[in-house]
Amino acid sequence: MQREVCLTVVVTRLPAATPPGAELYVASNLLGWRPDPSHGRLQRAGDGTWAVTLTVPAGARVEYKLTRGSWETVEKGPRGEEVHNRAVQVGEADVAVRLTVAAWADQITAPPPHHTLTGNVVVIEAFPAPELGGTRRLWLYLPPGYEASEQRYPVLYMQDGQNIFDVATSFAGEWEVDESLDTLVREGRLPGLIVVGIDNAGEARLDEYSPWLDRQLGKGGRGNAYVAFLVDTLKPHVDRTWRTLPDAAHTGVAGSSMGGLIALVAGLRHPEVFGRIGAFSPTFGFASRMPIRFVRAARAGVPQRIYLDMGAEETGHPAHDRELVDLTRAAAAALTDGGFEVRLVVDAHGRHHESSWAARFPEAATWLFGP
């Protein structure tokens, strides 16, 4: 059994505008990056400081931020800038850290956004999504030379559209999909690819990205409706509106974390629609490991390519990281046994972060849509 130690986080100063009844939380990689984890709630002391003691595995790298209970109220720098994840490498003894909070996200005047869109990206602000009970913003990347030709292109549907193309709309950095695909086309490694990014549902993201309810988190269960939106509403519209190659062999679905999970669900349940699946750092442990049972039961009825990957340093928690890699290897083995064409990548230094997924995307795209 792995030894555990205590990590105490002490906040010595808060912004003057902090609401009197505020509750403070430590959101961390060891607590699933939930903005309001019950075990991460700080208590106010008589001397005006706030503190919480977390029990963590010895040797773990803990990354964390302070929030007032949501990502909309996460801590910011003194000029409203993003605060990089705080980090502490825990050893074999108890440790305490002391810190101050400069500002809260909901109390600052945001600077003008720094957009990083390149190439030809069309943004549709409110695309009808009847299966989801509203509308959803879409991002549509068109390959170089699209307007000047009559060529048709394969399509990749990607989840968490906020994080795919533009750092100004992302939570923690972007995938740089537009830059990567422009480069792949210029180098002759891909003939061109249309990418459709679908924004996630914010607080309801976990609900839409899993067909199974995780009873411990109280999240999940609306994944079937989300897949129906992709298959019945979004794809037919894209095929009618742009020059696509609509068959399954030229249609893919991809995402990371929970987005990778719902990509697997969509692809495996609809092989007649999605012949290419990309699951980056998928959350196979969600809902008591129901996703693993799901992939073990899958059998290939038609040819499908499935790209799976996982970072060996996803969370900074060594035991948990080994478990994540083992689960992904087990999923890859089960899918291979089920008759699928599978590519597994374990990134020795990969983290659960957009920068790692961005680095792995070009290889995944060329394999999924290459010859």
Image: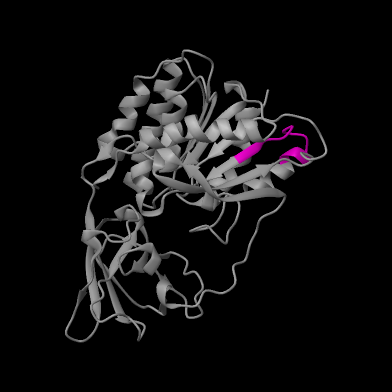
Q: Is residue 347 above or below residue 25?
A: above
Q: Is residue 341 above or below residue 150?
A: above
- The tally of labels here is 0
Residue drawn at x 66%, y 47% is 178
Q: Is residue 143 left or right of residue 356?
A: right
Write down the quadrant of residue 18 in the picture. bottom left
Rendered-image quadrant of the N terminus: top left
Q: Is residue 345 above or below residue 126?
A: above
Residue drawn at x 49%, y 69% is 82
Write down the quadrant of residue 21 in the picture. bottom left
**Residue 90 seen from this side:** no
- Most extreme residue toward the top, as rendered? 301
Q: Position of residue 192 (x, y in %)?
A: 72, 35
- Judge by depth and name the residue closer to the eye, 202 or 185: 202
Q: Is residue 344 above or below residue 361?
A: above
Q: Is residue 32 left or right of residue 169?
A: left
**Residue 284 seen from this side:** yes
User: What stretch of residues is rendered in magenta?
Assistant: 184-195
- Most extreme residue toward the left, as rendered? 46
Residue drawn at x 48%, y 34% is 230
- Judge by depth and name the residue closer to the eye, 345 or 251: 251
Q: Is residue 185 magenta?
A: yes
- Judge by depth and name the residue closer to the eye, 200 or 340: 200
Q: Position of residue 113 (x, y in %)?
A: 59, 67
Q: Position of residue 290 (x, y in %)?
A: 29, 31
Residue drawn at x 60%, y 35% is 238
Rendered-image quadrant of the C terminus: top right
Q: Is residue 147 magenta?
A: no
